[in-house]
Image (cartoon, rainbow, N blue to C red):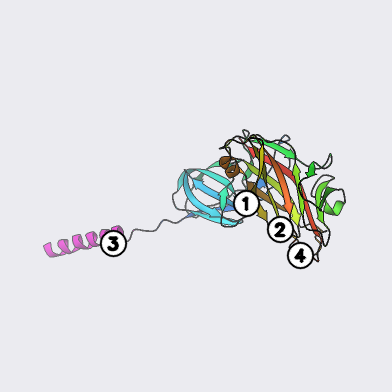
């Protein structure tokens, strides 16, 4: 009997050892995120957005960044605090995606078990502490000609050319003309170190740039923020609207002694045979 007892004991130890060496894999649960919603409140301007992905966390542990729709696996089961952040392309560039700092996260709590699939449609909104100043063109044009300029900037109320509301801004350069350069003469006094974004809806058949004309010690200098690629082709008179988030914070940081800044929009035609048409709307400054 003793050899049999020893054999059975070794067999039990062997089987337990196998479980230790090759433990059973956990069966995951899943979060299914088909879409999201976004809404600005009545004082925050347009609800237009360009959220490109969702950053997902469970108990503050990252589960990854996902384009939607997404099926997110969760191995750590039980009751979990789920948090989702809205992600954007910073400056419209695909490889500089960030959690947009002014959109509040979506929070929920789930009790998760193996094979379970929970469908969540997160709702995003601005933080209440975000300071937002939006300028549209419903009351007319606020961009004025500056410097050497043979382009025009006006307001269009043609339904096919308006993003939302009744009017949008319209920059134009005729064939043979060389330069559009307009600015908003509002003196912006955001301090150095501020987190500052310009949100903007736009359509253009030519590259154009935006930046600050910065005045320091009575002297003015141009500070480029971004060159924006075309969204449309041909004559550009039928807009292909896009939303962009432009980071102006580094310009503030580079000009700590600035007295004030003025936004500019500038275009130099890349073709002498095609007119340039640039449409913009909902210029929204967002900071804390």
Residue 15 part of the magenta segment: yes
Quarter of the picture containing the C terminus is: top right
Residue 72 in sight in this render: yes
Q: Is the magenta stretch mostly helix, strand or loop?
A: helix
Task: Tell me if mark 2 has few (under 14), some (14-19) or many (20+) residues whose alpha carbon lies within 10 angstroms of its own.
Answer: some
Secondary structure beneath dot 3 equals helix
Q: Residue at x 32, y 61 (%)?
A: 22
Quarter of the picture containing the N terminus is: bottom left
Nearer to us of marks 4 and 1 is: 4
Residue 1 in sight in this render: no
Q: Which of marks 2 and 3 is nearer the N terminus?
A: 3
- Labelled pair 4, 1 in contact (Cβ < 8 Å): no
Where does the image place residue 146, in percent across and percent down from the top left? 77, 45
Nearer to us of marks 1 and 2 is: 2
Give residue 91's mark: 1
- Labelled pair 1, 2 in contact (Cβ < 8 Å): no
Left or right: 227 in relation to 278? left
Give the CA distance from mark 4 to mark 3. Answer: 71 Å
Q: Which of marks 3 and 1 is nearer the N terminus?
A: 3
Q: How many labels does the image show?
A: 4
Q: Earlier in the sequence, mark 4 or mark 2?
A: 2
Q: Which residue lies furthest to the left in this view?
A: 2
Task: Tell me if mark 4 has few (under 14), some (14-19) or many (20+) residues whose alpha carbon lies within 10 angstroms of its own.
Answer: few
What residue is disc 3 on? 18
Nearer to us of marks 4 and 2 is: 4
Give residue 271's mark: 4
Please report the bounds of the magenta region as a residue range.
1-24
Give the CA distance from mark 3 to mark 1. Answer: 53 Å
Residue situated in front as seen by the camera: 12 or 115: 115
Secondary structure beneath dot 4 equals loop
Secondary structure beneath dot 1 equals loop
């Amino acid at each position: 009997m003793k050899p049999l007892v020893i054999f059975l004991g070794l067999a039990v130890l062997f089987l337990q050892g196998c479980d230790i060496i090759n433990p059973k894999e956990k069966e995951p649960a899943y979060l299914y995120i088909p879409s999201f919603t976004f809404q600005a409140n009545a004082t925050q301007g347009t609800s237009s957005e360009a959220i490109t992905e969702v950053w997902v966390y469970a108990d503050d542990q990252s589960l990854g960044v996902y384009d939607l729709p997404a099926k997110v696996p969760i191995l750590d089961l039980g009751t979990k605090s789920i948090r989702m952040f809205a992600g954007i392309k910073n400056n419209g560039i695909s490889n500089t995606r960030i959690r947009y700092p002014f959109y509040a996260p979506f929070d929920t709590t789930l009790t998760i078990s193996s094979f379970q699939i929970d469908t969540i449609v997160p709702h995003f909104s601005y933080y209440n502490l975000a300071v937002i100043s939006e300028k549209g063109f419903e009351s007319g044009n606020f961009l004025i000609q500056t410097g050497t300029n043979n382009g025009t900037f006006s307001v269009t109320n043609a339904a096919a050319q308006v993003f939302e509301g009744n009017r949008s801004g319209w920059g134009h350069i005729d064939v043979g003309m060389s330069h559009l350069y307009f600015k908003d003469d509002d003196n912006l006094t955001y301090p150095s170190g501020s987190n500052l974004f310009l949100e903007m809806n736009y359509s253009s058949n030519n590259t154009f740039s935006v930046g600050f004309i910065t005045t320091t010690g009575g002297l003015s200098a141009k500070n480029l923020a971004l060159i924006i690629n075309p969204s449309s082709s041909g004559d550009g008179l039928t807009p292909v609207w896009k939303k962009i988030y432009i980071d102006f914070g580094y310009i503030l940081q580079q000009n700590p002694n600035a007295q004030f800044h003025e936004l500019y929009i500038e275009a130099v035609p890349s073709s002498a045979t095609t007119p340039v048409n640039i449409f913009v709307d909902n210029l929204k400054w967002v900071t804390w």
